[in-house]
Image (cartoon, helix red, strand yellow):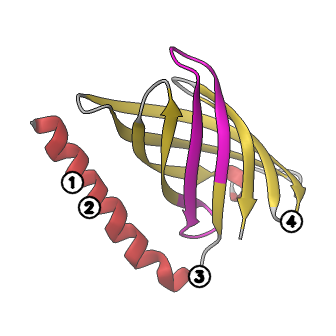
Amino acid sequence: MKKYFFVLMFTCFASSAFSQVENYGGSQSLRIGANFFGNDNNLKLAYNYGINEMFTVGAGVYTFNDSYAFVRGDFHLGSVVTLPDNLGVFAGVELGVIGIDFLNFDPQLGIAYSLTQNMDVYLEFGNTGTIGVSFSF
């Protein structure tokens, strides 16, 4: 029961963050990827919203072997570390529920490479690894 309460509170916090960040007019992206290591091989679909240049929040799902819904937050290191314009490094965390019983906490480190102004390829490493494509709009 405590797990469900914690997930509910975190989801409410994340949704309030979405309502507060509208004033920033931040970037939006849709990520499509696949896990390449870990216990399960899953497809990943995630939406990210940029609060500012350094932070994004989002939500998504994994599907295939397991059903997994999550909320996520990322800290983008590009404004702290000097990187080429087409390269991005980020650290973040996903918090979600696998099935109906299991709460999952997944810290991660990622790298993204811009192919075009609106399309990136990315790698994320954490409890699982994900490789995918991100579309900005």
Residue with the most extreme front position: 64
The residue that label 3 is drawn on is: 25
Left/right of residue 35 with respect to residue 114 in the rendered view: left
What is the number of the mark on residue 111? Answer: none
Quadrant of the frame with the C terminus: bottom right
Q: Percent x, y for residue 65? A: 49, 24
Sort mark 3 into few (<14), some (14-19) or many (20+) by Cα contacts within 10 Å. few
Q: Which residues are magenta?
A: 31-56
| Mark number displayed over residue 9 | 1
Residue in view at x 41 percent, y 44 percent: 70
Q: Position of residue 15 (x, y in %)?
A: 34, 66
Dominant secondary structure of the residues highlighted in magenta in the image: strand
Q: Give the labeled residue for mark 4.
A: 117
Amino acid type of the residue tagged 2 in the rendering: Cys
Q: Earlier in the sequence, mark 1 or mark 3?
A: 1
Earlier residue among tags 4 and 3: 3
69 vs 35, left or right, is: left
For badge 1, the amino acid type reads Met
Sequence-first tag of 2 and 4 = 2
Instruction: Name the residue that disc number 2 marks.
Output: 12
Q: Regarding mark 3 in the picture, which secondary structure is present there? A: loop
Look at the numbered discs 1 and 3 and tell me whether their residues touch, using CB distance below 8 Å. Answer: no
> Can you say whether 17 is above or below 132 in the image?
below
Distance in Å between CA atoms under marks 1 and 3: 25 Å
Looking at the image, the residue that sits furthest to the top is: 39
Quadrant holding the N terminus: top left
Within-10-Å neighbours for mark 4: few <14, some 14–19, many 20+: few
